[in-house]
Amino acid sequence: MMLINKEDVKIGRGGGKGSRGKRDKRKEVLTKKSKYEKEGLIKRLGLEGKKRIEIKKTIRIPVHYDVTKNKMDQLVRVTERLTYGIRLIGELVSDVYADTFANVKNSKILPDDNDIDSILKLSVIEDIVKNSNIIEKTGLNSNFIQQCINKVIWMFRQHRESHKEWEGKVERVENRLDSCRNDKELEKADKWLGKLRKREPSKPFDKSECDHKIPCRLDWRTGSVEKSKEKGKFPLWIHISTLELGKTIDIPLNPSIYHLNQLKDAVVDDFEIIKGGDSRKKKNKGKYNKQQNAVYIHVSITKIVEEKEINSVGGVDQGLNKSIAAVLIPLDHRLDNNGIYPREEQLTDSAKVELLEKYDDIVSSLQEARKLEKAASLQKAEKWEKAAKAAKKAAKVAKKLRSLRNKRENVSTYHDWCLAKKVTEFTKGSYLAIGNSKFRQTQFRGNGIPTLRKRIGKWTYGRQRKIIKLKRSEMGYRTELRDEYGTSRECCECQSKLVRRVWNDGFSYLLCHSCGMKKDADLSAGNIIATRCRDDMLKAGMIRMQNPVSQ
Ligand SMILES: [Zn+2]
């Protein structure tokens, strides 16, 4: 039996004769169809034969508020059907390979990724899907089905990755349990292990999971982003297949100037349709009524920039007080450029740090209040009126906490952007290595700085690194993450390990017993990261020592 008919397969950018009907000549298709389009972009930018950096990023464009209800309904129906398809396929894969997934989970030996890789293949899953009733059940054409399968594969891969990370964490805590020196440490590690066990990443498509929408990546086979060639109300559109065979719709978008600029010198890979998103906007009833159900198109683009020449190597250490220590050293350590190196800078944004700390204080005092009210409502259980009152109060506090957390999150993101901008500015002209810190783990054991630990938990090292890397690559400079193991326990002047980290209120410095150096611990770490990075680059032949002595 043929489940996929030929007509189906034709849906694509067929041109005039295909099932998608006539192309609109007034629109330029931005979504790429093949790798040649990237080469075209390179040519257009004049970057052939030059060193290049490829940047992948996502921009989030709202659907235009003036879109007709009819079109919107069709779009929503497509996304709903895709979610249904993804869920059916996911559950099917999960069932068929339950054994393989279970084995991986239970074996103590590092699981064989080949097993999983051989399953998570488009062709393999496609065969399973063809032998099921999913295609008839969903009525999706074969292109949509393939895209659903790709999403399922991606979800299983993501789960695999986060599960591995989690396994590593559990293993480390278990090792710590073995090496505990006293009961207090044992109790702490045990408590942490319990918490960690509860945080095991759940398998995708667990049937207990609530049925929220799962976005699906749509590429040129089922939809494209298109730009109007004429000036008009709607500069940007998406063109997308519908559930009806051969029928397509065009949805206008509402891009900002920033969005249009981003699209100018970029190739569009694919896009996702995502409903809602901004929970804060839902509150403004009436005025933003249409925004309550706002739909956003997340467009993934590839940009290409020329890689610039470097004159130094930088090291960045993310400090404890929401600050960043950056150190630049010359490519050749004998070339000191009249003593301007090493250039050191401690970057921070004190106004925002203060604001963040203020929010943190309010949040923790509210948490305390909620705890008290909750306890009160339990204690007064015999007098239900009082108990209900206390419970009501607790709920009120919880609501306030939520809104405060949102506000804090906004300040925090903004802070990260500002800092990243400063780092990018300071490290212009250099190759940069960022210490891949794992503070949450290393700071676990009692080290006498509990208040510090509390703050670290809330800080966003990962996000900051990501933003710095993106900003720098847009300027044409590469950034790498590097394991910073031991960088804070080494003297940057004499490489001695005989150092002591001295903690003071909010900051710490490194004291070297060999040479007597006394330096900010973060700057020292930044210096070591940069030095190690430069040594590796020399070894790899990425940079070459000039010979200033013989000339
Ligand atoms: Zn020293």
Image: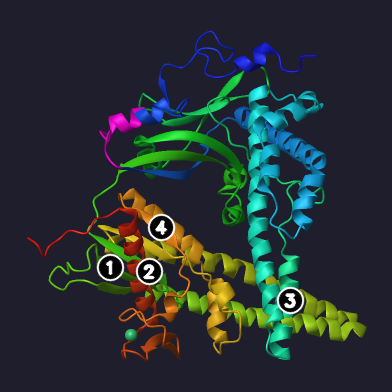
Q: Which mark is residue 328?
A: 1
Task: Check contact, mark 3 vs mark 4: CB within 8 A.
Answer: no
Q: Residue at label 3?
A: 394
Q: Which mark is residue 529?
A: 2
- Which comes before the other along the chain, label 4 or label 1? 1
**Residue 534 at least partly seen:** yes
Question: Of the residues tagged 3 and 1, which is closer to the observer?
Answer: 1
Q: Secondary structure at mark 2?
A: helix
Relative to 92, residue 493 above or below:
below
* Amino acid bearing label 3: Ala
* Amino acid bearing label 1: Leu
Q: Residue at label 4?
A: 480
Point out the stretch of residues depicted in magenta. 40-51
* Callout 2: CB less than 8 Å from ligand 1: no
**Label 2, label 3: how many angstroms apart (C-alpha)?**
48 Å
**Label 1, label 2: how many angstroms apart (C-alpha)?**
10 Å
Question: Of the residues tagged 2 and 3, which is closer to the observer?
Answer: 2
**Label 3, label 4: how many angstroms apart (C-alpha)?**
46 Å
**Residue 73 at least partly seen:** no
Left or right: 416 as drawn, with respect to 407: left
Task: Check contact, mark 4 vs mark 1: CB within 8 A.
Answer: no
Question: Of the residues tagged 3 and 4, which is closer to the observer?
Answer: 4
Q: Position of residue 512 (x, y in %)?
A: 36, 88
